Image (cartoon, helix red, strand yellow):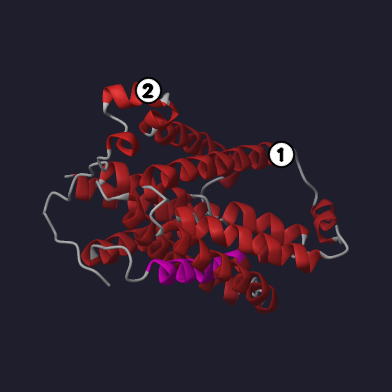
């Protein structure tokens, strides 16, 4: 039952990506971990593959409309790939525990949620087309250097916690690469797919993964992406983005609550024996209802 529920959520994740162009991918990790019972590191690998593939699908219509700047995608994309590969390698080190990754993920989800809420609130004011030209002006002397630096930072977070980073990539492309908003969105999808591939390669051979779930979850998200791209013609993205931002805020609080043991004093945690890091016990994650075996790459 949880397997079916998780795939239904995957469809809605794809729909949100199609409607909003980003943000929905951050729901994949908590869905896999808390609904489908997948260990965090494996969930991150699955998310990287799903988000990368869905981003490629989303980039196709933008390519046809001329909304993708390949030069910018190459510069920013390769820097994010370096960061994503490095972040994934760091994540496989023994000191990077599942709890630490989920706490970092919750923090990133909080940032994404607040960014969506603030962005949608600003959109409530009418913006004339000429006002958008403001974002095309140079805002720094060494914009490309800052773009590469941010790309590496976003990539590291992608590798560590599996978020695509669209909420950070689009503003960077607008303000630093001086791209119009539509081109920034299209180009960001290419960049997200690039850093997802690099993050996946960083985990390659080091984390066990359920291959059948990898395919089915990605397929479900892809179906949702296609549906979302169609529904965007009929749905107000402004109101949807704000509501989705508050929803992400709620989920981030839930993830923090699920990992609340880490905030308890060491003495009380040791007495209770519930804190995995002190008791020496690894956290337990339920297996899928159909007991599919995990296979290595």
Q: Is 108 in front, or is 231?
A: 108
Give the position of the C terminus as an image quadrant. Answer: bottom left
Is residue 231 shown to the viewer in this render? Answer: no
Q: CA distance from mark 1 to mark 2?
A: 46 Å
| Count of residue discs | 2
Classify 10 Å Cα crowding around label 1: few (below 14), some (14-19), many (20 and above). Answer: few
Residue 194 painted magenta: yes
When the figure is inspected, residue 278 is found, relative to residue 30, above or below; the finding is above
Horizontal side, residue 149 vs residue 90: left or right: right
Image location (x, y in percent) of residue 230: 46, 59
Query: Which of the marked residues, 1 or 2, is nearer the chain's N terminus?
Result: 1
Image location (x, y in percent) of residue 16: 46, 51
In this figure, which residue is indicated by the disc labeled 1?
122
Image location (x, y in percent) of residue 72: 69, 73
Residue 280 painted magenta: no
Question: Which residues make up the magenta segment?
Answer: 188-203
Quadrant of residue 45 within the rendered picture: bottom left
Give the main secondary structure of the magenta stretch: helix
In this figure, which residue is indicated by the disc labeled 2?
267
Which mark, residue 211? none
Q: Residue at x 31, y 63 (%)?
A: 207
Quadrant of residue 228 within the rendered picture: bottom left
């Amino acid at each position: 039952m949880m397997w079916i529920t998780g795939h239904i959520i995957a469809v809605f994740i794809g729909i949100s990506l199609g409607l909003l162009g980003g943000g929905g991918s951050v729901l994949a990790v908590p869905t896999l971990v808390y609904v489908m019972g997948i260990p965090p590191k494996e969930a991150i690998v699955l998310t990287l593959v799903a988000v990368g593939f869905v981003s490629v699908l989303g980039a196709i219509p933008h390519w046809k409309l001329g909304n993708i700047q390949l030069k910018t995608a190459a510069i920013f994309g390769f820097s994010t790939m370096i960061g994503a590969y490095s972040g994934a390698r760091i994540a496989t080190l023994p000191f990077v525990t599942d709890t630490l990754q989920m706490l970092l993920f919750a923090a990133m989800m909080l940032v994404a949620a607040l960014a969506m809420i603030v962005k949608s609130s600003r959109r409530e004011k009418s913006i004339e087309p000429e006002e958008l030209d403001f974002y095309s002006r140079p805002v720094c002397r060494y914009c490309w250097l800052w773009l590469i630096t941010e790309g590496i930072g976003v990539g590291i977070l992608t590798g560590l916690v599996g978020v695509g980073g669209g909420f950070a990539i689009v503003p960077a492309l607008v303000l630093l690469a001086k791209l119009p908003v539509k081109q920034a969105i299209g180009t960001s999808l290419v960049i997200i797919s690039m850093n997802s591939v690099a993050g996946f390669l960083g985990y390659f051979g080091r984390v066990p993964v359920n291959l059948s779930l990898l395919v089915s979850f990605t397929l479900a998200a892809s179906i949702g992406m296609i549906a979302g791209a169609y529904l965007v013609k009929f749905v107000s993205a402004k109101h949807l983005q704000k509501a989705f931002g508050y929803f992400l805020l709620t989920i981030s609080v839930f993830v923090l609550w699920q990992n609340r043991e880490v905030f308890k004093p060491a003495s009380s945690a040791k007495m209770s024996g519930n804190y995995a890091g002190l008791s020496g016990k690894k956290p337990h994650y339920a297996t899928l209802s159909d007991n599919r075996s995990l296979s290595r790459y």
